[in-house]
């Protein structure tokens, strides 16, 4: 299971829509979504992108003069619940 | 998926709180109504003299306290602003006109629906059309400009305002007005309203629930995350009402509390509110939370809502259960024209700036 994913954030909605349009034409799997809560308390749009394509995507943005705000790699945090951690630890020990 | 479940439950808590506050004394289908509550505050401060809607609603103070607290704990309390404040102020005034012609902010529209008020269906349809029109501007490049870091004291203004409101509520000086009859006199006990408001504010800051954002994302990018929050509000409020407020639960158009049955103006009022919410980047509820995070653009928006509410009652724009007023109709029409002109003008300006930039490059 992936424990991280990558998103690009934008200044405006239109930037996000332009980004999606261009990269869909290039055949990238892009999904527009709300900015992940971990990186912002705002409720703007971001684009989920394949992390391994980061360099290529940034290159195309430069070439096509596509504007965006920032690139983010988001690591999904381990569950903080002590109970689940405890169960996990015990099962690991038993193994 | 897990995230959607979380926001659904967060929304659910807001819905339940709505039902509880109604049970404890808030007006009918108005457990929470952000627009009405700012209107009541405007009345209490003497900005309008509609005697039946004057009260310093502790829920609003609680929202701000909760928002500040959650933002500080999350390291998200930041002073920012400077994104076309005067346009926001004007949009907020018209947002309030639309809401008070309909009789409720988008949140109360959902709560009205959840207690069987079918008039809110026309409000919802109008709100959706308004959001659709707003999206049209977003697609064309509408933006009020990036907000920038502001001096620290800007971020303290709205929280200080809320503390001041709390003091006025508790001290009750003679220059503050409290309704003795009508919706303004119907209220949940102060401490409970304040605490439930605080819990709501905290949850709203964490979850970023926004009635405009939920529909916007669903229409614009087919993302339903925030819509789950709205659904949570509706379903849990419905359940809460069936359990706590069964006496008042009634599926009908007629005889609904603080509502009128003029479908066209219920619809058009919320079209105006929907457009304004999208052009402002959030509904009144969301603006309240953003303001408590230190966003002074949202702060200006709140002040615009309060001023808009005062105008709405001073100029006989606000509806009453008897129906819509001629001035209300006129205000909605003028509002629609003005906000569409604002949207167009902003888009034109963005395109012009972009062309200029491209020429330089």
Image (cartoon, rainbow, N blue to C red):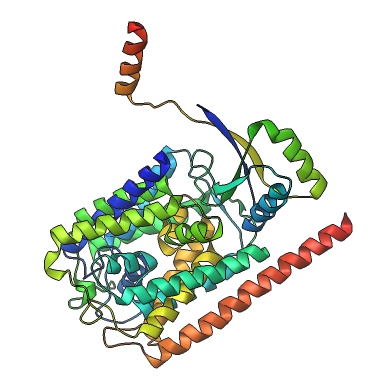
* Residue at the front extreme of this rendering: A27
Q: Residue at x 61, y 54 (%)?
A: B147
Q: Is residue B152 left or right of residue B233?
A: right
Residue B233 in which image quadrant:
bottom left
| Residue nearest the observer in this picture, B167 or B65 | B65
Q: Is residue B221 above or below residue B3?
A: below
* Residue at the right extreme of this rendering: B360
Q: Is residue B264 above or below residue B228?
A: below
| Residue nearest the observer in this picture, B190 or A82 | A82
Residue B346 is situated, as x and y percent measured from the top left of the image, at 66, 69
Q: Is residue B249 left or right of residue A24?
A: left
Total residue callouts:
0
Residue A2 is situated, as x and y percent measured from the top left of the image, at 53, 28
Residue B271 is situated, as x and y percent measured from the top left of the image, at 47, 75
Q: Is residue B115 above or below residue B164?
A: below
Q: Is residue B245 left or right of residue B168?
A: left
Q: Is residue B255 above or below residue B347?
A: below
* Residue at the bottom extreme of this rendering: B326
| Residue nearest the observer in this picture, B161 or B14 | B14
């Amino acid at each position: 299971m992936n424990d991280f994913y990558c998103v690009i954030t934008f200044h405006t909605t239109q930037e996000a829509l332009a980004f999606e349009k261009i990269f869909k034409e290039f055949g990238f799997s892009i999904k527009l979504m709300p900015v992940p809560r971990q990186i912002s308390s705002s409720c703007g749009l971001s684009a989920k992108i394949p992390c391994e394509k980061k360099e290529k995507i940034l290159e195309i943005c430069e070439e096509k003069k596509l504007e965006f705000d920032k690139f983010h790699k988001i690591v999904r945090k381990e569950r903080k619940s002590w109970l689940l951690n405890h169960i996990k630890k015990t099962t690991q020990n038993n193994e | 998926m897990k995230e959607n479940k979380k926001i659904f439950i967060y929304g659910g808590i807001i819905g339940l709180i709505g039902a509880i506050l109604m049970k404890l004394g808030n007006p009918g289908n108005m457990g929470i109504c952000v627009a009405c509550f700012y209107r009541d505050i405007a009345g209490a401060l003497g900005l309008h003299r509609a005697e039946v809607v004057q009260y310093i609603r502790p829920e609003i103070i609680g929202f701000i306290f909760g928002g500040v607290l959650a933002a500080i704990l999350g390291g998200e309390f930041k002073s920012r602003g400077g994104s076309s404040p005067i346009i926001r102020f004007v949009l907020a005034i018209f947002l309030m006109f639309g809401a008070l012609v309909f009789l409720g902010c988008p949140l109360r529209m959902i709560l009205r629906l959840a207690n069987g008020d079918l008039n809110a269906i026309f409000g919802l349809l109008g709100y959706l059309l308004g959001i659709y029109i707003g999206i049209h501007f977003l697609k064309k490049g509408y933006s009020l400009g990036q907000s920038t870091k502001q001096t620290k004291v800007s971020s303290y203004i709205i929280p200080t305002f809320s503390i001041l409101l709390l003091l006025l509520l508790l001290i009750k000086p003679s220059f503050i007005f409290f309704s003795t009859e009508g919706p303004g006199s119907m209220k949940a006990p102060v401490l409970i309203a304040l605490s439930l408001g605080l819990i709501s504010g905290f949850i709203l800051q964490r979850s970023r629930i926004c009635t405009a954002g939920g529909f916007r994302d669903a229409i614009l990018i087919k993302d339903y995350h925030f819509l789950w929050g709205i659904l949570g509000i509706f379903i849990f409020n419905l359940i809460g009402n069936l359990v706590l407020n069964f006496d008042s639960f009634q599926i009908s158009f007629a005889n609904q509390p603080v509502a009128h049955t003029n479908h066209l103006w219920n619809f058009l009022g919320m079209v105006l509110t929907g457009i304004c919410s999208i052009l402002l980047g959030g509904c009144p509820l969301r603006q309240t939370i953003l303001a408590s995070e230190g966003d002074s653009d949202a702060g200006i928006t709140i002040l615009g809502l309060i001023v808009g509410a005062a105008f709405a009652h001073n100029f006989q724009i606000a509806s009453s259960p008897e129906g819509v007023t001629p001035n209300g109709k006129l205000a909605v029409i003028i509002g629609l024209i003005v906000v569409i002109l604002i949207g167009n003008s902003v888009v034109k300006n963005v395109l012009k700036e972009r062309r200029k930039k491209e020429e330089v490059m």
